[in-house]
Amino acid sequence: MQLTGKTALVTGGSRGIGRAIVQTLAGEGARVAFVYQSNAQAAQDLVAELAREGLTATAHQADVRSKAAADALVARLCEEWGKLDILVNNAGVIRDTLLATMSEDQWSEVIATNLTSVFNFCQAVTRPMMSARYGRIVNMSSVAAEFGNKGQVNYAASKGGIDGLTRCLATELASRGVTVNAVAPGFIETDMTAAVRSAAEAEIKKRIPVRRLGKPEDIARAVAFLASDAASYITGQVLRVDGGLTLGGF
């Protein structure tokens, strides 16, 4: 297992892509902690499922928009584990609507949850990882950051911000053995994309060269690779995992 002996923190880890990431990292041998917002049952179900498989994960309720919450959790994990090797910033929401009718709350919630949370947790892990001269940070972006979609001004802005943050932080931390990369999913079968899929799944598949929607596990495997020592010479990159969707434009 390529992550044996590593410790990892995943935000937004109880459902969808986050859940698959937690499962994959734990399956590769990492000791995993994950953050959930409100669905305690889903979080505990995941912990129990992994325990039955002999794998280790712990669930932590926190508001990822809170800098204090991020600092406190990272400090706790570093104290308990002695180190934190991997951070995966996966927490995110969508509040799609056209800009003309978008409320300030719809803008602010998406920016705070998707982008500010990445700042919060990246800053919290920076000093421990720099001191250890080792770290892997993987941020969850989206193809929407580069290829605009109607009704997603807030979402695309948040993901574009993540791409820029990823590249800049990579240059700041590279000399200390810390890599920073992002994964940009295309259309993935999750609760978040359910509404779009129910309305136009057949048409969407026609636009994807591999002729299928992605699965959370497709994203999780890419994250696990970037979090491993096999990716030690990769930093500052945004890896599209989209079945070829963006080859001809979005």
Image (tube, rainbow, N blue to C red):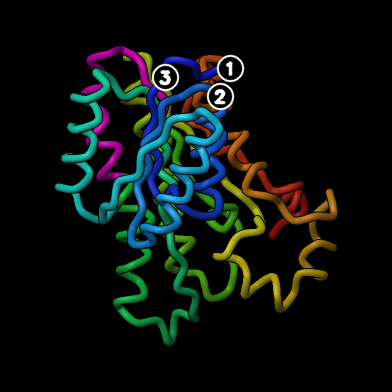
Three-letter amino acid code at disc 3? Lys
Sequence-first tag of 1 and 2: 1
Q: Which stretch did the figure color magenta? A: 119-136
Residue drawn at the location 38% of the way across and 56% of the way down: 114
Q: In the figure, is residue 209 to the left or right of 246?
A: right
CB atoms of marks 2 and 3 within 8 Å: no
**Mark 2, residue position:** 28
The tag earlier along the polypeptide, 1 or 3, is 1
Crowding near pointer 2: few (<14 within 10 Å), some, many (20+)? Answer: some
**Residue 122 forms part of the magenta stretch:** yes
Give the crowd class for mark 3: few <14, some 14-19, many >=20 residues within 10 Å. Answer: many
Residue 40: mark: none
Helix, strand, or loop for circle 1?
loop
Q: Amino acid at mark 1?
A: Met
Residue tagged 1: 1
Residue 201 position in % (x across, y down): 76, 69
**Contact? badges 1 and 3 (CB < 8 Å):** no
Q: Which mark is residue 6?
A: 3
Q: Mark 1 and 2 residues: CB-CB less than 8 Å, in contact?
A: yes
The answer to which image quadrant residue 81 occupies is top left
